[in-house]
Image (spheres, helix red, strand yellow):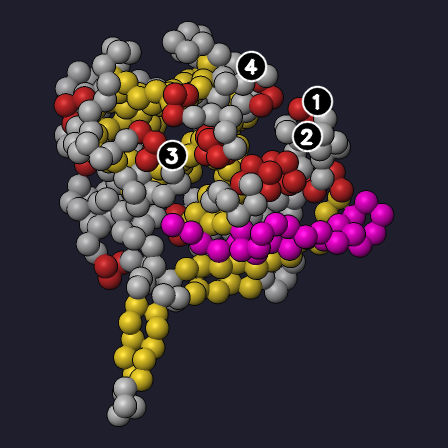
């Protein structure tokens, strides 16, 4: 898509950070082990930890020693109700899988040992969106470049309590070609807005962080605390690079500033916007409803959590994506007819 051609926006909402934020999940629900199921994964520095992969700050990456050979990260949603653990996407941000010659597979199951697991990474079971070439023989995903990867699949509506993401060298039973770097892992459901926004969408790029000072002689000096988001491990942010060389220092390719979008959606039905009963024990009436209230605003806890946003849900252009937060503390809706509402969406890029 690109050229900032806004279609029907889509948000990818992370289930793991949501459950961590409100206290349902904690560190014990995330397992990081080598493929023998007992040996802990070793990082290159003692300061790295598994939880840094789930802090929604992709520039804050961990580095896993290449001698781990094969390892996996597994998340236990703690949900015995299938409707609460549904998923439809995985994003891995700020990785060097091309340089490390790393491939990965995604399995979802009600069994912690992955018995009878659904392998959503198998060719034909998922849709590659960004940097996610599939290995036809092993059911693995083999990113063609460093940077980030995004896949989606048909919503996993059953057998979905656990998700396991397994990493290995593309050549089995050997060390990775280099230490493996991972910034952030996002897993959950994506949400499409009911239709495209109204005309007069506002797009701004904010170059904040700069303070101007004027000398006695009238000269102007600039003092900047930042120009934009920090660089990633081996690429500039949100880039996909097929070279194995470290391109993080390519500052001339870095997109500076902070993107902001302000848009309005008119004539949404009440069922698109609101759930049937926000205090219902029936998941279909609240938590698992398709309303924007429950599937989007509730899952990001207002401004608390960022989300992966794309200006058009059908886009495969990496420049159309980014991590954003609500610019306002909540959402405001206005009824314009019987069972018909207008809402505004103001979001700001975050890192």
Residue occupying image coordinates x 26% and y 14%: 35
Can residue 335 be found in the magenta stretch?
yes
Marks 1 and 4, the one that precedes in the sequence: 4
Rendering quarter of residue 135: top left
> Quick one: label 2, few (<14), some, or many (20+) residues within 10 Å?
many
Q: Secondary structure at mark 1?
A: loop
- Res 92 quadrant in image: top left
Q: Are dots 2 and 4 in contact, CB under 8 Å?
A: no
The disc placed on residue 80 is 4
Highlighted magenta segment, given as a residue range: 326-351
Task: Residue at the far bottom: name it.
Answer: 217
Who comes first in sequence, dot 2 or dot 4? 4
Above or below — where is 204 with respect to 93?
A: below
Judging by the rendered image, the residue that carries numbered circle 3 is: 54
* Observer able to see residue 286: yes
Give the quarter of the image for residue 285: top right
Left or right placement of residue 252 versus residue 229 in this view: left
Residue drawn at (78%, 48%) of the image = 340
Magenta segment: does it hold 340?
yes
Magenta: main secondary structure:
strand
Q: Earlier in the sequence, mark 2 or mark 3?
A: 3
């Amino acid at each position: 898509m690109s050229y900032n051609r806004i279609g029907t926006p889509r948000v990818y909402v992370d289930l793991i950070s949501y459950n961590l934020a409100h206290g349902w999940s904690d560190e014990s629900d995330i397992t990081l082990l080598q493929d023998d199921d007992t040996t802990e994964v070793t990082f290159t520095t003692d300061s790295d930890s598994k939880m840094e992969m789930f802090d929604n700050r992709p520039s804050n990456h961990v580095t896993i020693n290449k001698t781990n050979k094969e390892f996996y990260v597994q998340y236990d949603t703690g949900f015995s109700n299938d409707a609460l653990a549904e998923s439809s996407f995985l994003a891995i941000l700020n990785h060097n899988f091309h340089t490390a010659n790393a491939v990965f597979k995604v399995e979802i199951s009600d069994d912690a040992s992955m018995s009878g697991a659904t392998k959503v990474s198998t060719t034909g079971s998922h849709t590659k969106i960004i940097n996610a070439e599939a290995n036809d023989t092993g059911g693995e995903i083999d990113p063609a470049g460093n940077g980030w990867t995004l896949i989606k699949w048909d919503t996993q509506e059953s057998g979905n309590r656990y998700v396991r993401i397994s990493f290995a060298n593309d050549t089995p039973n050997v060390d990775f070609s280099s230490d493996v770097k991972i910034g952030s892992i996002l897993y959950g459901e994506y949400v499409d807005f009911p239709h495209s926004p109204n005309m007069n969408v506002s797009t701004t790029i904010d170059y904040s962080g700069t303070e101007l000072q004027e000398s006695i002689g009238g000269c102007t000096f600039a003092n900047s605390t930042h120009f934009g988001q920090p660089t990633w491990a081996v690429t500039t942010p949100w880039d996909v690079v097929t070279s194995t060389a470290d391109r993080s220092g390519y500052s001339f390719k870095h997109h500076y500033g902070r993107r902001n979008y302000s848009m309005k959606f008119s004539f949404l039905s009440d069922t698109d916007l609101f759930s049937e009963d926000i205090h219902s024990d029936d998941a279909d009436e609240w938590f698992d409803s398709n309303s924007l209230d429950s599937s989007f605003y509730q899952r990001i806890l207002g401004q608390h959590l960022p989300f992966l946003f794309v200006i058009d849900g059908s886009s495969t252009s990496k420049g159309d994506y980014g991590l954003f937060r609500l610019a306002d503390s909540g959402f405001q809706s206005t009824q314009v007819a019987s069972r018909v509402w207008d809402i505004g969406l103001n979001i700001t890029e975050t890192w």
